[in-house]
Amino acid sequence: MEKITLVLNGKKETIYFEEGDTLLYVLRDRIGLTGTKFGCGYGVCGACTVVVNGEAVRSCKVLFKTLEGTDILTIEGLTDGEKLHPIQQAFVDANAVQCGFCTPGIVMELYALFGKEPDASDDRIKEVLSGHLCRCTGYESIFDAAKLAQKTENYSKQDKKDFESAAKLAREYMKKSRKEEK
Amino acid sequence: MGFKYIGKDVQYRPDVLERVTGEAIFIDDIKLPGMLHAQILHPKYAHAKILSIDTLEAEKMPGVYKVITGKGWEKHYGDCIKDMMPMTVDKVRHIGDAVAAVVADTEKRARDAIKKIRVEYEPLPVYTDAMEAIKENAHLIHEHSDEYFHVSPLYEPIPKTNIAVRYRIKKGDAVKGFKEADVVVEREFNFPLMSSAAIEVHGAIALFRMDNTIEIWTSNVGSFAVREEVAHLFDLPISDVRVHVPYIGGCFGYKSDPSLGPLIAYIASFVPGHPIKLRVSRQEDFTSTFLGRGIRTKMKIGAKKDGTFTAMEAKLYLSTGAYADTGSNVLIVATQSAGGVYEFPNADVTGYSVYTNTPPVGALRAYGHPEIQFALERLVDIIARELNMAPADVRKKNFLSVGKSNVVGEKMKKSDGNLYKCIDNVERAIFPKEKPKEDENYYYGRGIAGLIKSPKAPTFAAKGCHIKFNVDGSVSVNMAGADVGQGLFILVRQITAEALKLPLEKVRVYNEIDTQFSPWEWQTVGSMFTFQGGNAIIKAANKAIEMLKKNAALVLHRDVSVLEYDGNYVYDRSYPDVKVPVSKICRGYIMKDGTTIGDVVQVSSDFRLPGAQNPDPETGMGRTGVSYTMGVQGCELRIEKKTGKVIIDNFATSIDIGRVINPANARGQVVGGVVMGIGETLMEEIKFDKNGKLVNANLLQYKLPTIYDMPGKQTIEFVETHDEIGPFGARGIGEHPMVGVAPAILNAIYDAIGYDFYEIPLTPDKIKAVIDGDMEVR
């Protein structure tokens, strides 16, 4: 067994692993953080996406030994156990969760995207979402959720992180824009 | 009737928080004390005799507990045809068969040991298509198929052939019908093998205990079916097998038949006392569970000059795979659905389920229906052309409606739906203005197709429901329906709250399926849960209300017949002040001195398709569907001249589902189903090489639709013709949106480029070849 030290979900941790372990294997099978999902094992489906140093990565393709000193965020680190993160809330509000197996990966992808590009264009949002397979939703609601999440995050910055009223504003905005579409 | 919760967008699904936070426990998230890991050895050949298996080296590998083969095992299993074994013996029949297994302390060590097993094979001829395997003198994939147990007379094999089941429908006199026709068209179609390919792969855990009981955890929507198969295999009372079903990451059909259950139980039987886990790779998820579709159809229809259909004749060939138990149901359903949404007074349809050296076909969303209606709906467009009629007009001329009979001779009822409203909705969405003229970059096309589906299940299939009143007036609802993402739990909550006049917060739906506690149901399949499960809830709710009234009658000294229930109280209808709160009577009523009277209010109920019958074995006629759901789909599309790529700008779906219970979920099912259908039509196909190796068993080469493949817009309108039987008039919607997608798109492609395709998937290269003139454009 080897070990490295890194920050996982905000806490400094020393983690033991074996030479060939992927990040996904360590998260799921060694540490028991099972919110991150295995879908294909070669980075195509996106279900295993986590955030490393602010970037969305496919954890099934990253060797754990390369992660010394990094800052890793998984779906488990996104909530405080009391309130959903605005991106998660947006997925609930937009009915973008069906079986939920692809959801954690997509939420983490959007977390990384909006962290770097809060005003990402629709095309850019579609581009990052195109790396995630969802067999249930047909993507319409996932795109809606992404837009809603983006709005909420931006509103919540304006409103000094008052998430409740930001979410309300964002929902109203989405309703209005949907009506205009029709 | 005014509803409080039915038809309303009710937030939130009781399971949504767990799913969106990653807390939901799926099969691969389960770790048990003492758990070991299994891995499977699959054959080098798709069809071969096993001459010898040498496991010695593998047994010596580090961490290995046991190396297991099928040697000495004799018992077969299967629901309708017992032609399967948990592990293959003497012979391999497809590339995903299980030849041997290793149990080790870690998955990696099990995998390493698998590589040390030496197997000698004698290769046999390989058939990957029914048309090859059905030929005279073809090598038999099952030498003694007639000796297997099969449910008579529907599942009879033809001995000494690879035909596992032949199924016939004879309605009226097809020969006479074609004589009456002015126009006859005939074509051959192919709906190839595909995969459900949920994002979560299959997994299972089994534990054999010292007391000879078996406990299983599996990603399967048929908990009770798994239990029965495993009990059968080990000659145990069914009650000694316990099956748990955790959250499931998408089903789409292939997690409904007992896929890994029998195999993992067999393996675990060699290592009693240890839970044994098997999680398959993505490749095994393709090769070693179930595939879907795989039907070739030769179909002929005839019509009079005015467009009235006179007859149909069809032959269906299903490449059922190495085992026919599950595929044969797909074939039978396809045969029974050959007439689609139209009345054919005469029909002669024969289906063949043919053994092939491919992974077995099982359920795939709406199985049997899209395969055959693809052929029919294309042919209707072709005959419309011959008749010089608009495709919509030929359809309207022949639509099933009240009193007309479908291809199995069932008379349609008003509540089976109103196709005329559906087609109006779709025409309004797709043909509001002139089609754009061909331009520099694109061809433009528009097309429509009808769709029909009935639940398709054994006549005894039912859903059970337990409702328990708690002392604070809240209720617990326990059912065995698996929520695979369709929103089943919120539906249970809505229906229960409506039926018991309770606020949603007072209804808790159990989200764990465990055959030890859950009421019996057949399987969560066939878009049947709303219909059967919903009715089971209403029946249970009514029983509970009756019990509350009986208890109240004792307390209030009134006759039950004058009492009313409003969710909070039971009271005298004429003197509402004479009342008792539900919370005081739901565990019986405690009098001042402590004496307690009345019953504890916990009830059990169930519901099945009323009056469903087996078909007549000679003609295939009979009440086999009972409850039908019909609709119309259509699309506007563009074909990019440079690449042959199909871009769907607008896809419209209108289905008569009786009543919408949860609008957001109903829309979600359609949006997702249509995109899955687009995948089947434009990109998905399982491919084999000539040796029967599956060459695209991964998500890189087996392409699923991405966000770039969703239509520019989806127009969805539900028609709500009250269903006489369904709960609050409702029927299911899970599978139906798949059914008309492929023919609607191919009909639109003809409209765009004047070329008839008969086979899917239509990848851009195939269309480009036609545009470039490499294929003849008619």
Image: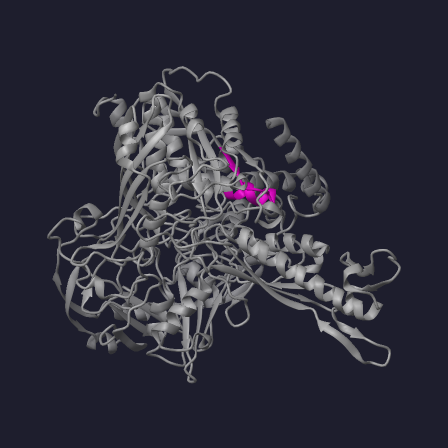
Please say whether residue B667 is one of the residues in the magenta stretch. yes
Figure label count: 0
The quadrant of the picture occupied by the N terminus of chain A is: bottom left
Q: Quadrant of residue B40?
A: bottom left
Q: Measured from the top left, where is residue B180 in percent x and y? A: 30, 28
Q: Nearer the viewer, residue B705 or A105?
A: B705
In this picture, is A72 found above or below B336? below
Q: Nearer the viewer, residue B560 or B717?
A: B560
Please say whether residue B663 is one of the residues in the magenta stretch. yes
Viewer can see residue B508: no
Is B751 positioned to the left or the right of B634 in the image? left
Q: Measured from the top left, where is residue B89 in percent x and y? A: 21, 69
Is B630 positioned to the left or the right of B606 in the image? left
Viewer can see residue B610: yes
Q: Quadrant of residue B499?
A: bottom right
Q: Residue at x 21, y 75 (%)?
A: B55
Q: How is the image coloured?
A: one colour
Q: Residue at x 34, y 48 (%)?
A: B620
Is A22 positioned to the left or the right of A89 in the image? left
Is B680 positioned to the left or the right of B629 in the image? left
The quadrant of the picture occupied by the C terminus of chain A is: top right
Q: Measured from the top left, where is residue B592 in percent x and y? A: 86, 78
In this picture, is A122 found above or below B166? above
Q: Nearer the viewer, residue B673 or A166?
A: B673
Q: Measured from the top left, where is residue B36 in percent x and y? A: 38, 74
* Region rendered in magenta: B653-669
Q: Nearer the viewer, residue B49 or B467?
A: B467
